[in-house]
Image (tube, rainbow, N blue to C red):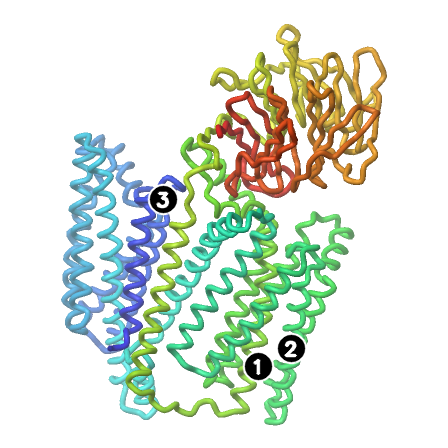
Amino acid sequence: MRKPRIFTIACILLLLCDSAIVMAHIYLKEWLGFFDLDKEGSIKSVFSGLQLLTNGFLASFIAYLSSRLRASRPFIALWAMISALFIYLGLDDMMMIHERVGFVLNRLSGFHGTYESFNWLWYFLPFIAIGGIAFILAVRSLAFISVKTRTYAILGLSGFVLTLLIEVIGGQLLNIGLVPLYLKSIIVEESLLLFGETFFLAALVGGATALFLKSYTARGDTIEEISTIKSLTKIPSNTVLSFFIHWSIWAVFFILIIAILFAGFTAAMPLLAHIETLFHVIFPYEAVIRFSVIWVHIVLLIGYRLWIAQRDKRHHRALWNILCFSCILLIVIFAGDWRHRLMEEFSWIRYTTSGFLIAACASSLIHAVHAWRLRLKTLAGTWVFLAGGFLFGAFDELFQFHEWIGGVIENAARLPHVATDLITVGYAFVSLIALIFFFILFRRHYREHLFSLGIFLVAGGIYFLSTLLDTLDGLATHFLKKIALSLSQNPDFIFRDWFALLWSPHNFFNGLEEVLEHTSAVLFFSAIAILLFELKHDTQKKREKRDTLSRALTQRCALISYTIGIIIMIAGIVLGQQSTISTAKTNLIIARPQDGLMHADDLFYNPYWGLIIGNEGAHSVLQYKNGILKKLPDPRHIVSDTDSVTADDFAVYASSGARGAILQYTEPEGWTELWTRNDGLSFPEALVIVDNTIYVVDESKMAIIQLQTGKQPIEWKPEHPDWRTPEGIAYDSAQKKLIVTDDTTGAVFSLVFKVSIKKIARFSHAEDVYITTDGSYIISDNGTGSIYRISSDGTQEKIIQLSRSYRDVQGVASDGTHTYIVTSDGYGQGSFMPSFVLQLKQ
């Protein structure tokens, strides 16, 4: 079995990327606009533009090499023209230059032709003809340079020609009203364009490689030049690759790694859901982050182990062992430290990060001593400086120096808190510049140990990425909020489980930042330690050739590793989809941000008023009745910060914690104030009306307040060890008792005002309670994203389980047939998810 060439593998990967973009348009176009092949700024336009720009730079490289080989001026001019054409096409694909110019010319000429947006074909026809001739000559030139490129070049040119032909046909289809056929023609057109670009890229790489080698041999047969050519012809893939194609292969490799990371995070969510179902548990958000990180670590380690099976190098095995040890440490930290989130100052992960940095410092000092003994003072000084940087990083991780410095600067100059983030970014840029300098110096002295230097460079890149995550989490939150608002406009759109991984971007990105800092510390230590080992032991001796059976097994392992990467990406997309919001039989969104919903926190059902929604963020109260959603009028702008709502047949009542007021709405009078802070209220939240009496929960006082018109408020603070932060309240008319939830302890209490308190149930984070006409209690559990029913006989039953992205359950109500809930509030928690009011039917 012949070992696959890296060049062939790279072409296959690019073609797979092309296919993935087309498949994303077919299946995922409704998710986000950037999956649409026919839209500006889509992922296709960016990818296609990058391919075309790469083609342009390769064509310019061919022109440069041709000039060095003293080719004819027309030949050089041809490739300069091809370079300019590709660069223009790349920019045009990303910025839609030809469409914009076409629209301008349409307005100037008044010509509308077959279809206005396709008239650019006629305006650009002379340039298209010239470009076509140039491309035909380029194909002939590539065949002259290297016969192996002929097939790729012809396929690429065919893709371009067919693309133009189908675009003309598509314009005609759209003009006569055959929209479905036009939409299908877009898929064919863009697929041909992507494949044509990829094939032409392969042809240009082959031609540039051949010219690159000819430029070396044309300069003479010196020993240095011959050795250079031999080094190019004896690389492990047995393929002649020049410097630029080597780095392009690595670029494709890193793109694949990023894709696997994304797919790994995506696939972790359904896997976690299966674990929850199997063991009947619901994991909190912090556990979701930790599980996803460990899952991705394990996937990468498995993939790297298969790569090691192919390479069979000692330093690869050493790195894999260190990474396995690091992964075990992360598992211990994630499983043992539940008192702190990953992003918090006293998380255990800071100790392992600082430990690896100290180990890297010690290894650097050993290198410094070794360099000093060889009288390489500059190199020794560099190692000492690097050791000092590692030591400072370790102590900064333990004692948070940059936080202290940022606090001093902020207080002295009265700057916002962002100053600390800017200091972190400053560290990152200084460190990045220093690491680049170190890499250049080390490459000069350790040119035969590129593996260690490569790890060193990757570690620096990961550290720089971690600092960006620490600084840009606010921008990420803002960006995700915009995306969520845009997606929520589609009534059929469902936020998949993998959105829940980013539910709180601040927590996720800062937690991931700590993991990346840990990983960079591990890689810094690995690079320096492996380099130290290689210097003390001669690892450059050639290994004996393996037998045919061993080589065949290695090739199979290589193919398995490539296949696993593709399977993981596909599984991440397929498993990451779910078609329902909850386990209820019917799921209907009756209010969304586009309806004015913003940080809604509570709701209540009354047969006369229908469903009443406390719209906290928009300072309003909404009414949903007979399928119509409307805002209760508030011309005097009395309503603000609506924490809770309730109603009877006479009026609607709302509490405002910020104003410390209880408001009443009636159809004749509108909104009026009943009680304010002048009456002794502090921060009233949940409320319920019983006859002519209102009972209000004041979380700040941990008390229940009884309000009656014309009487002084009566305050009662129940005595119970689980009474900490009372949240929701309802009234059981059959038992004549108040039912109160506590969202800290998860307890549900049955109370007689100023007489008794009894805990009747306990959940994870009991948020709200509603009592149905049959006497059952409906409880919303924010901790598990579930809705429970407590029957009159005390039996507890989970009736609805929300999908992960909708588990931030707030208020709950029921009309006997449907259960209504407010979900995805996320207010004050850094969530990007908007509010929804859901109508669910079991």
Residue 702 lies left or right of residue 627; in this view the side is: right
Q: Residue at x 14, y 60 (%)?
A: 136
Q: Marks 3/2: CA distance? A: 47 Å
What amino acid type should be assigned to the residue bearing mark 3?
Answer: Leu
Q: Residue at x 31, y 61 (%)?
A: 14
Quarter of the image where one finds residue 333: bottom right
Tag 3 near tag 2, CB within 8 Å: no
Question: Of residues 730 and 125, which is closer to you in this image?
Answer: 730
What amino acid type should be assigned to the residue bearing mark 1?
Answer: Ala
SS under mark 2 = helix
SS under mark 1 = helix
Residue 645 lies left or right of residue 16; in this view the side is: right
Is residue 98 among the parts visible in the rendering?
A: yes
Of callouts 1 and 3, which one flags the residue occurring earlier in the amino acid sequence? 3
Is residue 389 among the parts visible in the rendering?
A: no
Q: Which residue is mark 3?
A: 28
Of callouts 2 and 1, which one flags the residue occurring earlier in the amino acid sequence? 2
Q: Can you name the residue that lies furthest to the top here? A: 668
Q: Residues within 10 Å of mark 3 (few under 14, many from 20)?
A: some
Tag 1 near tag 3, CB within 8 Å: no
SS under mark 3 = helix
Q: Residues within 10 Å of mark 2 (few under 14, many from 20)?
A: many
Q: Residue at x 41, y 58 (%)?
A: 259
Question: Of residues 399 and 837, which is closer to you in this image?
Answer: 837
Q: Which residue is mark 1?
A: 529
Tag 2 near tag 1, CB within 8 Å: yes
Residue 411 image point, x, y percent:
77, 51
Q: Marks 2/1: CA distance? A: 9 Å
Q: Residues within 10 Å of mark 1 (few under 14, many from 20)?
A: many
Considering only vertical position in the picture, is 226 above or below 714?
A: below
Q: Which residue is mark 2?
A: 359
Considering only vertical position in the picture, is 572 above or below 208?
A: above
